[in-house]
Each structure stands twice: as C-alpha cells, then as structure tokens.
C-alpha cells in the first residue's frame, strides 16, 4: 500500500454516469495500491469527518457502480468562500486530511466544484501541507469551459432527444381532437446545451421540436406565440422545448421564483414549462400539455450514451494518474481530435482556467430564427449521444443497480460545528 490516502467526493447535481467515474477512480487507485476514502455528501463529509472506507466494498460492487445512476457517496451543494473568509473551515479540512493521512483529493463536480478544488489546491500551496487536488468534470449542463464536453451531458442529451422524439409521436397521434401543443422543460440555467440536444430529434423539415427556447436568446412572448400559432396551423401540432433559464430582454429569468437562492447562491428557478403552457392556453386558446422531467433527465442510466460512459470512466482513471503524479490544481478534460470518425483524448487543464466560468452555446449553433439548431451544432452533438450502454437487468425485469455498504471510518477529531 502506497503511503498516503486518496479522498474522493461527489458534488452538485448527480448524473447517470458520475458513479462510473467513481468506479474508475477506485479501481485505478486499487491498481496502484492506494487506499481510497470517500467523503459522504461531498465537501461536507470532509468537514464532518464522515468518511467511507471503500476498501470494504467488493471488486464486483465497485465495478457495478459503472452502471448505477445517482451519487453512491452522496452529493451536496455547498460552496466554500475565500481562504480568508472561511479560514476556520479550511483549517478543519486540513485537520481532517492530516488525521487520515489524505495526500490526494479528487472533487467530482461542475463549475462550483471546480472552484472548491481550486481553493483547496491554493490552501495546500499556502500552508505547505502535502496535498494534491484534482477537479474531476461532471455536469449535465455541459457548461464547463476548456473541455469539449462534460461527462453526464451525453446521457442526459440522449434521454432528452429520445423523450422528445417519442412524445412527439404521441402528440401527433392525438392532435386532431386533443393536445395541440406540448411543452418540455429541460435543465440549463445559463447554457442551452440540453435544449439544443432536443433538436437531434428533428431529422426532417417540420419535425419536432419545432420550437426550442435557449437561455442565450432573449424570450419574446409575442414572437414565441406567433411561432407556435404558425406551426400549429401548418403541421397541426407543435412541440416546444424550453430551457429553465430563459430570460426576458432585461435579463430577468422568465421563471424566477420570487428571488430565492439555492445553496450555491444561484437564483431558484420555478417551472418555466407550465408557465409557457398557461401562456399558450390563455392567449392562443389551444389545448396544451407540459412536462418537467427534472431528475429523470440526469438519472436515466437505462438510456445512457456509450460515448458518455467512456468519457466518465476515462476522466476518473486520468484523475488518479494526475494525482499520483503530483499535478496539483488540474482537471482531466475531453479533447476532440477528429469529427469523422469521432475520436477524442483526455488532457490535463489548470482548474484556474475552468472554475467560475461557463460555456454557453456559440451563436453559430443556433439558427437564424432563434428557435432551432444549426448543422454545426448537430455535428457537435451527434457523437456525444452515440452508442448504447444498458445496465444488466434482474430476473424481475428491473435494472440491477448496486447499493454500497458505505462503511465509515472511525472519527479521530472533535465533532464539526
């Protein structure tokens, strides 16, 4: 066993493949004879000294993580402030790391998690504590800069495109005497990547979704209603896909729920889908159905993209390599090296270039109408949803997902807080 312990933690909204990254991390570390602890509920587990001993899990259970959705070790939405503002918390983390001989910390998450990894890498450098911090990418929003795409996005994109295509067949069948407009809300606070993924379902002229609303394009109610009315008149029905983060021209979220904030300090958005559905019903007099898939779009492991799974595994293995090489403050990112055939590789990028930044949809990915995707966007998206990676199924017909023992290690410090 190598001297020192590796601590892994999950953060932010989980995905269909974040556990695949965890599986890759633990297997890679075991192959290097490195002990792995996991913090329960992200960085909060580290602060609370609530640590799981992954050596108590069987090799089969760790392998099974790769086909199990959710976050096996628990996640959190918790953002550390600066080293000066949250000095007691950073000291507590140092004390916990030291008590358990943690020499490598891998934080698996999105933008705010990258910020935490950056701050911890700075803490290590400032204090002289021998700690290597690695940010590990994950987010269905696909909004991390530098990386070509984010593990978790491809599977959510596949789920979105398939769900919209299937729902459109239902709407088309019922439109003569029932629903004329179907509104499908997707995640995406500032970036319209998931909304764009729905556009993959439209493989011919006038196919659904006929209207996509992106956060990058200001919402114009009159123009939107005219578009829906025109589509219904021409096609007989209309499917609308809307990102939760669409905004009015003045920058206000259309679905801003009373100015509330989440644990990361972001605006707490309400349901823009039902809001638009009510607008269409009230102002156009059309029968409308709506849906908000919410957690379903990020947890649908049964419909995972094989490409996405391969990305998730690769960044986990690379993260362990970078950590053991002492490459403090980096993140493994996906680099697209060829479009056709699709090829990619993993490289290290400084977390400082990634934290607190967002990658939004390029203008060239949204068509002139503002309601659809371009050929360039389709070309970017298609490889990310390719391939199937179904989980194994039990005799009763349900997926055979794993539940870990989650055996905690003995605490060595006074309780936190």
Image (cartoon, rainbow, N blue to C red):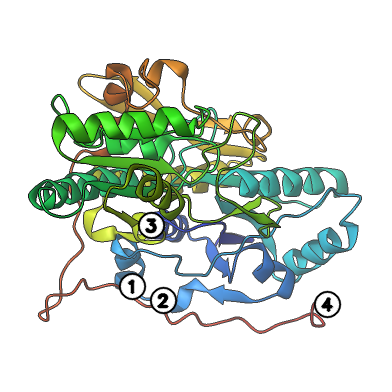
Pointer 1 or 4: first along the chain: 1
Which disc number belongs to residue 292?
3
Asked if residue 86 shows in the view, the reply is yes
Pointer 2 or 4: first along the chain: 2
Mark 2–mark 3 distance (CA, rounded to whole Å): 36 Å
Q: Is residue 336 above or below residue 107?
A: above
Pointer 3 or 1: first along the chain: 1
| Residues tagged 1 and 2 counted as in contact (Cβ below 8 A) | yes
Between circles 1 and 4, the one closer to the viewer is: 4
| Residues tagged 2 and 4 counted as in contact (Cβ below 8 A) | no
Residue at the spot of label 1: 61
Q: Which percent across, then down, holds residue 208?
A: 21, 36
Residue in the image at 65% along x and 30% along y = 250
Q: Which percent across, then down, holds residue 322?
A: 55, 41
Asked if residue 24 shows in the view, the reply is no
Mark 1–mark 4 distance (CA, rounded to whole Å): 34 Å
Between circles 3 and 1, the one closer to the viewer is: 3
Residue in the image at 40% along x and 49% along y = 282
SS at circle 3? loop
Which disc number belongs to residue 417?
4
| Residues tagged 1 and 4 counted as in contact (Cβ below 8 A) | no
Q: Nearer the viewer, residue 108 or 37?
A: 108
Residue in the image at 27% along x and 18% along y = 375
Mark 1–mark 2 distance (CA, rounded to whole Å): 6 Å
Residue at the spot of label 2: 57
Mark 3–mark 1 distance (CA, rounded to whole Å): 33 Å
Between circles 4 and 3, the one closer to the viewer is: 3
């Amino acid at each position: 066993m190598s001297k020192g312990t590796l601590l892994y933690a999950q953060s932010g909204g989980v995905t269909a493949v974040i556990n695949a990254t965890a599986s890759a991390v633990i297997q890679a570390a075991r192959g290097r004879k490195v002990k792995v602890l996991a913090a329960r509920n992200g960085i909060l587990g580290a602060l609370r000294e609530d640590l799981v001993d992954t050596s108590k899990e069987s090799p089969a259970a760790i392998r099974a993580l790769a086909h199990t959705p959710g976050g096996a070790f628990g996640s959190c939405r918790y953002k550390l402030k600066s080293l000066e503002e949250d000095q007691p918390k950073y000291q507590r983390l140092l004390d916990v790391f030291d008590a358990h001989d943690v020499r490598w910390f891998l934080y698996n998450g999105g933008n705010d998690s990258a910020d935490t990894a950056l701050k911890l890498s700075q803490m290590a450098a400032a204090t002289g504590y021998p700690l290597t911090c690695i940010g590990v990418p994950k987010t269905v929003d696909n909004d991390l800069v530098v990386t070509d795409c984010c593990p978790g996005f491809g599977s959510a994109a596949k789920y979105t495109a398939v769900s919209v295509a299937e729902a459109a067949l239902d709407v088309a069948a019922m439109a003569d005497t029932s629903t004329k407009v179907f509104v499908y809300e997707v995640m995406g606070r500032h970036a319209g990547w998931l909304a764009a993924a729905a556009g993959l379902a439209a493989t011919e002229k006038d196919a659904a979704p006929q209207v996509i609303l992106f956060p990058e394009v200001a919402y114009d109610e009159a123009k939107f209603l005219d578009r829906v009315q025109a589509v219904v008149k021409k096609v007989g029905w209309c499917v609308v896909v809307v990102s939760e983060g669409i905004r009015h021209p003045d920058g206000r979220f259309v679905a801003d729920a009373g100015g509330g904030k989440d644990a990361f300090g972001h605006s707490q958005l309400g349901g823009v889908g039902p809001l638009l559905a009510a607008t269409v019903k009230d102002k156009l007099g059309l029968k409308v159905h709506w849906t908000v898939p919410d957690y379903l779009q990020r947890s649908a492991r049964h419909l995972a993209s094989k490409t996405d799974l391969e990305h998730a595994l690769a960044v986990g293995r690379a993260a362990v390599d970078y950590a053991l090489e002492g490459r403090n403050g980096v993140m493994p990112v996906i680099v697209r090296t060829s479009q056709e055939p699709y090829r990619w590789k993993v490289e290290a990028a400084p977390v400082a270039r990634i934290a607190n930044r967002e990658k939004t949809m390029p203008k060239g990915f949204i068509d002139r109408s503002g309601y659809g995707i371009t050929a360039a966007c389709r070309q970017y998206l298609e490889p990310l949803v390719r391939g199937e990676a179904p989980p194994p199924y039990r005799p009763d017909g349900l997926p055979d997902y794993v539940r870990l023992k989650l055996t905690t290690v003995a605490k060595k410090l006074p309780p936190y807080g």
